[in-house]
Image (cartoon, grey):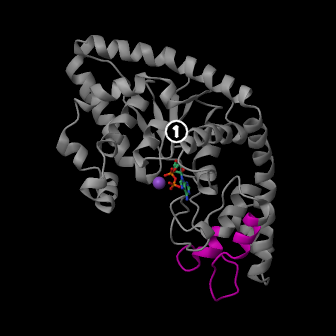
């Protein structure tokens, strides 16, 4: 396959993905299948860093994979698998960990933030080495490009450094991945606090979950925080709430923001909210229905994930064998 290879993944740490995950990541993954050789993973080993309930983790891995599929990840064209099904991730992570400086890993800002919140006793070594496992995920597949949000930039830099270090010390072994920051990425904000990014760890009333009940979704959008003016104008600095609603509408309806501004000129915010709720509910309905089907038929999902893991393993084994051989294992 002469197309560049893309690797991306999400952690199964929620019962549902949210609209930010969909518009900021998943929808791009689907589009990238047209031009790239795509590998998409549900990274359950990473999710262990938050000490989840075992049954919840198992279910979330499946429902996350089901959402990838429902959004349009095509398991015929792309490789879709669960990380722990391919043991080579953990094996390469060990080798890379032995090439990573303690100081270098200590400089990861996400670790510093999270460990500061959790304290030394609450912080695990798994959280510390998380970026090393992420590097293994990427390097195992000789990945050319990794779509990343701003918050993962530093981790991707470490992946690049480790690839270069491996190649410099042991001969050309792996592809050095590039970050792929998609410009048109819709960044979605919290409905209740529209200066904060929509996040699963944010305010529940600010979240639009892909699998939420339609009534809940519509209600949250109708309650979205706006401002005290009455002008529907895209101005993220002065009007973050209204701008977020316009972004969401435009991203899902395909109607340019300028046209939406014209359409809602002289109308109350309530009209905009009703229209946004309608667009969101309509867009998410088929996705939710497909997820329900997949979750109701475990055999189909199991087969897709087993096939994906088998295909991932073929590539991963080859890379790991190369690396083991080069380092003397
Ligand atoms: P969360 O912030 O809810 O924990 P993650 O950090 O797990 O989400 O992100 C998973 C993927 O979704 C990443 O590719 C990230 O860039 C994207 N993403 C998350 N939140 C948003 C958002 N509010 N807007 C756009 N993209 C987002
Ligand atoms: Na996050």
Secondary structure beneath disc 1? strand
Of 149 and 1, nearer the camera is 149
The answer to whether residue 306 of the structure is visible from this angle is yes
User: Is residue 226 located in the magenta-colored stretch of the structure?
Assistant: yes
Tell me which residue sits at (75%, 73%) in the image.
273
Can you give x and y, in whole percent of width and height, for residue 97 in the image?
26, 32
Q: In the rendered image, which quarter is residue 73 located in?
A: top right
Q: Where is residue 114 in the image (x, y as percent from the top left)?
A: 34, 57
User: In the drawing, does residue 193 fall left or right of residue 130?
Assistant: right
- Left or right of 99, for residue 187: right
Tell me, yes or no, whether the highlighted magenta stretch contains residue 311. Answer: no
Ligand 1 within 8 Å of disc 1? The answer is no
Assign the C terminus to one quadrant of the image.
Answer: top left
Q: Give the range drawn in magenta.
A: 216-244
In the picture shown, does residue 255 fall above or below 172? Answer: below
Q: Answer with the quarter of the image where residue 128 lies.
A: top left
Taking the image as shown, residue 202 lies to the left or right of residue 212, namely left
102, 260: nearer the viewer? 102
Q: Identify the residue shown where x is 36% and y is 29%.
A: 176
| Quadrant in which residue 215 is drawn | bottom right
Rendering coords of residue 282 (x, y %): 81, 56
Residue position marked by numbered label 1 in the rendering: 9
Q: Residue at x 33, y 29 (%)?
A: 93
């Amino acid at each position: 396959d002469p197309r560049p290879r893309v690797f991306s993944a999400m952690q199964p740490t929620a019962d549902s993905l949210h609209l930010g995950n969909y518009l900021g990541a998943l929808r791009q993954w689907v589009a990238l299948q047209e031009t790239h050789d795509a590998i998409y993973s549900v990274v359950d080993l990473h999710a262990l860093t938050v000490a989840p309930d075992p049954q919840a983790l198992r279910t979330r891995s499946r429902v996350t994979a089901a959402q990838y599929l429902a959004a349009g990840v095509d398991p015929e064209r792309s490789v879709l698998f669960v990380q722990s099904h391919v043991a080579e991730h953990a094996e390469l992570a060990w080798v890379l960990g032995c090439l990573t400086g303690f100081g270098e890993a200590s400089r990861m800002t996400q670790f510093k933030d999270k460990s500061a919140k959790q304290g030394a006793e609450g912080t695990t070594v798994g959280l510390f080495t998380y970026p090393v496992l992420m590097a293994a995920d990427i390097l195992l597949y000789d990945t050319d490009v990794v779509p990343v949000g701003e918050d993962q930039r530093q981790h991707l830099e470490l992946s690049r450094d480790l690839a270069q270090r491996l190649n410099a010390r042991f001969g050309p072994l792996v592809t050095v991945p590039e970050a792929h920051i998609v410009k048109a990425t819709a960044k979605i904000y919290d409905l209740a606090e529209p200066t904060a990014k929509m996040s699963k760890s944010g305010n529940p009333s600010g979240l639009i979950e892909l699998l939420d009940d339609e009534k809940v979704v519509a209600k949250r959008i109708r309650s979205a925080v706006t401002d005290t003016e009455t002008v529907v104008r895209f101005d993220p600095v002065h009007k973050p709430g209204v701008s977020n609603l316009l972004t969401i509408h435009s991203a899902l309806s395909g109607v340019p923001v300028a046209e939406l501004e014209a359409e809602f000129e002289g109308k109350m915010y309530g009209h905009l909210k009703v229209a946004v709720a309608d667009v969101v509910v309509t867009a998410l309905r088929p996705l939710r229905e497909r997820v329900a089907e997949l979750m109701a038929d475990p055999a189909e999902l199991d087969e897709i994930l087993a096939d994906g893991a088998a295909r991932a393993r073929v590539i991963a084994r080859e890379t790991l064998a190369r690396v083991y051989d080069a380092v003397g294992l």
